Image (spheres, rainbow, N blue to C red):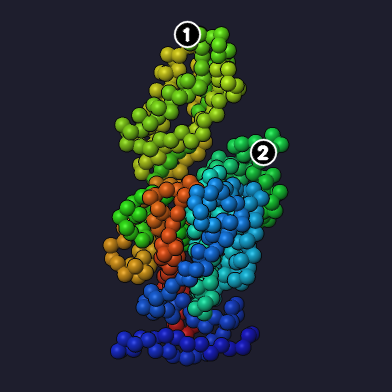
Amino acid sequence: MPAPIISACPVRTRFGVLSIRPFIRFFSHTPVHHLRSTELTPDYLSSLRSNPDRIWTDIHTSASKFGPGRRWGQDPTHTGLTRLTLTDHDKAARDWFVETTKSLHCDVKVDAIGNTFAIRPGLNNDVPATFVGSHLDSQPLGGRFDGVLGVCAGIEMLRVLNDNHIETEGPVGVVNWTNEEGARFPVSMMGSGVWAGAQDLQSIYKLKEVNAGTNGQRRTVKEELERIGYLGNIPASPIEGVRMAGHFELHIEQGPKLDSEKKSVGVVEGVQSYQWYEIRVWGQASHAGATEFKYRADALLFASGIVVKAREMAEKAGVLATVGILRAEPGSVNTTPDSVYMTLDIRHRDNEMVATFAADFQGWLKQAAGREGGITFEMSKTFESRATKFDEVAIACVRDSAGAVTGKHDVPSMTSGAGHDSVNTSKHCPTAMVFVPCRKGVSHHPEEWCEKEHCAVGTDVIVQSVLRFDQWRHKEGHFGGSLDSNG
C-alpha cells in the first residue's frame, strides 16, 4: 500500500468562508492528486477555468502540422483543414492525441474501428468512465474547429484536473471517434455508430472510399485502418469494449444563431433527424454535335432537374434538402452523359417529416422519369439518424455549468441541425452537448472560425459538466455507495 497522503478538504463555515480541514487518506492510482471531486464546493467548482492559450495552441498547432487546408487570409492560422479520415494526416493527428494523453497519465485504448479512448484513472476504476468526445477528421475543404475543438477541450480537461490536483470518483477520459464526417467513407458518425451497434462492423470494414486514390484504387475502411496502425484489438462495443458512464461534447454551432445573438454558449438538448440517399440516373451517351435535342436521353440534364426540384419541394415542405455530390460519366466535353451519381441529404426535427419528404420525392422522380424517353433511375437510402433527445441529468450538468461560467441564467437551449457522435453515445449513456458560436455560422469551409474566448468558455463548461456529473454519480451510488468526504 502506498504511503498515506495528507490532504485537505474544503468546507464552508457558517460565515460562508472556504476553510481547509486536513486529514489522512490513501490514494492508490494517482497519489499526487489531493482533492476529491466530491469535496469541491459549488463556489470552488464554479471557479475552475481552463487555460485559453493551451487550447488555442493545440487547435492551431495540430491544424498546421496535420493537414493544413486552403488558405483564406494572411495570418498563419488562416487556413482550413484537410484531414480526411484514415489518411496519413489523420494518422499523424491520432499519434499526437495518443502521445499527448499518455503524457497526462492516461491509459489509451484503440478499438476495432479505430476509436481511440484516453482514460484518466479515478478513485473507483471498476466502473465505466465519463468521457469528453468528438473527432479529429475533417471535410475535404473543412475548417480547423469542427470536431477538433471538442477533442482539444477534452485534453484541456485532463490538464485542468492535474493543475488543480483533483481526483475524480470515477475515471474520466477523452475519445477521438473515427470518421465522424463521413466524407471519405460515406457513413456519417461511423466510428461511434459501430461502437453503439447502429452500424455493422464487418459491413463497414468493406466500405470503399468515395474517390479513388492516386493509383486508381478505392481502398476499404479495414485496409486503411491496418495501413495507419489503428485497427485496434478490443471490440467496438459499449459492453464488451470501452464502456461509458456519460458523454459530453463541445462543438461549434455550425449555424448563425449564437453568433448573431451575441451569445457565448448554448445548451444542446438534442439533434434533428436526417437521412442520406444515393441517386443514380441512366440515359444514353451520344455525340454532342450529331444528336439533336429531341433524340437525346441526357442523364445530366435530368439530374439537374433533380437538384432544382429537391430545393423547391423542400422549401414547400419545411425541410432541408441538399445535393452534395454529383458526378457525370463518361465525362467528355463532346458527349452527352449516360449516367450520373448524386447524393441527397434530408433533414428536419421530426422523423416523420423526413420520411414523408423522401417518399414524396421518390414519387416525383418516378413520374418525371416516366415522362422522359430513355431515362431510368434508382434511389436508395444509405444512412439514417433519427431525432435524438439528450439525457436530462447530463443536460442539467451542462446548464448549471454554463450558468456558472457565464454568470447568466438565460443560456439558450438549442437543437443541433448537424449530426454528432453524441447521437450514438446517447443510445447507451447520459449524453449532452455544448455549442459555442462560429463566425457568421460558417462551417465545413476553410474560413470556419471560433474566437479564442469562446473556445475557452466552452471548455470551461465541459470541464465543470464532467465534474458535476461525477458528483452526481457519487451521490447516486454508482461507485458502490455514497461515501462521506473523508473517503
Element marked by disc 1:
helix
x, y percent for residue 95: 65, 59
Q: Is residue 265 above or below residue 407?
A: above
x, y percent for residue 22: 47, 91
Q: Is residue 165 above or below residue 406?
A: below
Residue at (43, 35) in percent of width and height: 322
Marks 1/2: CA distance?
39 Å
Depth check, front residue: 110 or 437: 437
Quadrant of the drawing holding the N terminus: bottom right
Q: Amino acid at mark 2?
A: Gly
Depth check, front residue: 18 or 340: 340
Q: Is residue 454 above or below residue 15?
A: above
Residue 487 showing in the rendered view: yes
Residue 196 showing in the rendered view: no
Going by the picture, which residue comes out furthest to the front?
Answer: 74
Depth check, front residue: 480 or 161: 161
Q: Looking at the rendering, which quadrant does residue 186 occupy?
A: top right
Q: Which residue is mark 2?
A: 213
Element marked by disc 2:
loop
Q: Which residue is mark 1?
A: 294
Residue at (49, 81) in percent of width and height: 35
Residue at (32, 58) in percent of width and height: 262
